[in-house]
Image (cartoon, coloured by chain):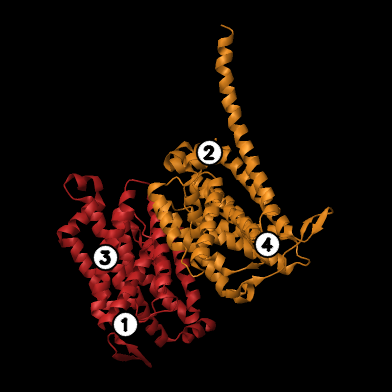
Chain colours: A red, B orange
Amino acid sequence: MEALGHFFQSIPIDLLLIQTVNGIVTGMILALVASGLTLIFGIMDVVNFAHGELFMFGAYVGVIVFAATGSFWLALIAAALIVAAFGAVLQIVTLRPLIGRDPLNTILVTFGISLVLQNYALWQFGPVARRIPEPIESSFTLFYLQYPLYRILIAVLSALIIGGFWLFLRYSKFGVWIRATTQDRVMAQAMGIPVPLVYTGVFALGAGMAAASGVLFAPLAGVNHTMGLDWVLKAFIVVVVGGMGNLGGSIVAAIFISLLEAYAAIWLDPSQAVIVSFVALILTLLFRPTGLFAAVSK
Amino acid sequence: MTTAPLDKTMPLNKTMLSHTAVFWIGFCAVMALLIVAPLVLPEFWRRFLTEVLIWGLLAMSSDLLIGYTGMVSFGHSAFFGLGMYGAAAALLLVSPPNLWLAILFGLAGAAGAALFVAYFSTRLRDIYFAITTLIFSQIFYVIIFTWTNLTGGENGLIFDRPHLTIPFLYDARFSSTTLHWFVLAVVTASYLTLRRVTQSPFGMVLQSIRENEARTRAIGYPVQRYKMVSVMLSGLFAGLAGVLYAVQNEFAAPDFVYFLTSGDTVIYNVIGGIGTLVGPIVGAGFFQLMRELLSRFFGDQFPYLIPLGIIFIVMIIFLPQGLLGFARRWLNR
């Protein structure tokens, strides 16, 4: 008992709170990445291996636009639009010919795309990380720490984008098309919904969201060519834990996983903290192989 | 009257005979070429060919999953790497270093990793399987990368190459030629074993899982157990490739446990032709040759994965069978 009490006393409450805020901030970015991934999967049955590279690509476009114009917000919008257009082209050229084939073909093709993009970034920008400065420099005091306001802003912005996306799915015509295609592809086509266009649109949308999160994340850590793999792995974990194709589940799971990693980082080395989320994945696979929140959606 | 049945049976017998005969003649011809090759080739290309064979073995092991069981593994780097580090453990801990002990340790390491991965990831199918194998291989990567005391961390482990020993008969240092022959022998034995496995009743069940998993389960086969055994078998051969690589290069490094090795393995398979066993070796050869030629023409800094990645994408769209795909039925008969 005494040892237990001692353990509880040794937990630094202030550190715990700071890590909670940090976890929620990264969790919101992760939710933005993962919701694009889960959307593309839910509608097209495509696991987009290149999603992390679209995230990275968005961050690089952000770096370039920021260097040219000096405006962070312009960089954010330009990156989202350019990468969305790029995603549309990518979908038409590489994924459209594969419709109707074994879904494993799509995972292979997107893997190939991720390889090409990653190596292109390395070739074009070199291995040195680039940076975008934070657009808002003010900060507030969180215990003894000067906590940058920008991080809070990221969480709010991500939430706004996800919320806007949800409204778009709910009320816009294209959103109705998307939901109809998710439910029954053949029937949707029979009702006159242009399913190939929906596919391209969804891929572009997911790509744009990944790019936006890339730009949002860029001021927190540097932009380099390997950042894509870290994020796509985390997003995969989130999507499996949250239930594949389940938007609400993946948002909750994103925050859950990020909080776990943030708390683990109090005691462990950050590179080892990743293992905690791997363990969360293993436990999910053991006890709820269809995802923690899958039962709700089906 | 009497000649008619004779005429009909003769060509039938003849074609059946000729298929196996042609197969073994082709096999012997390729073997003869590979045996003679190190005597003719200069040192660099000798090493290159040996390495291609090792990558080929890794790719072939993964073909058992991709081509025959219908599960794409993105985690073969874990088995390969554990084979490497297992061999390293045997070579560093036991003196004098023993080749066979290295193989034993490497296989044990790979088997451990494979058991772990197989137990969890075979609960999932298709894409989920691919993702979980990838994530598991990253777990092993993080552990190996951060456990510096045991694994040397980022620097890896360096050791001496063991002697080629056959107890009581033979004991000598490896030359690059004998090393090539040794690797060739191991890869050939693995190929024949895997070929036998895929043609056995067990292999037939694996292929039926690939074709229609639900029906296979309905017939009464314990599908998950079959999948687990197939992942473990595949992991063992991947570990064997890791041991060979460690013996050839005298080091073990965390880079080889990293996801990129698994990615290369998948590329070898797709380029060479999945479901053929020899295709992946051809694919590995093609990939490594292209890489070598590209960096010779354009310099070391040239991002060879860009053109190779584009070839890979184009092949999936237009030539999903791979280079040897046209021979797939024939090779599996």
Residue at 59% across / 55% down in the picture?
B52
Q: Which residue is mark 1?
A: A151
Which quarter of the figure has residue A232? Answer: bottom left
Q: Which residue is mark 4?
A: B247
Contact (Cβ within 8 Å) of mark 1 with mark 4: no
Please, what is the three-letter code of the amino acid marked with disc 4? Answer: Val
Residue at 65% across / 48% down in the picture?
B34
Instruction: Name the chain under label 1.
Output: A
Q: Which residue is mark 2?
A: B204
Rounded to the nearest angstrom, the CA distance separating label 2 from label 3 is: 45 Å
Mark 2 or 4: the one toward you: 4
Rounded to the nearest angstrom, the CA distance separating label 4 from label 3 is: 48 Å
Contact (Cβ within 8 Å) of mark 4 with mark 3: no
Please, what is the three-letter code of the amino acid marked with disc 1? Answer: Arg
Mark 2 or 3: the one toward you: 3
Residue at 52% across / 49% down in the picture?
B63
Above or below, B309 against B190 in this view is below
Mark 3 or 1: the one toward you: 3
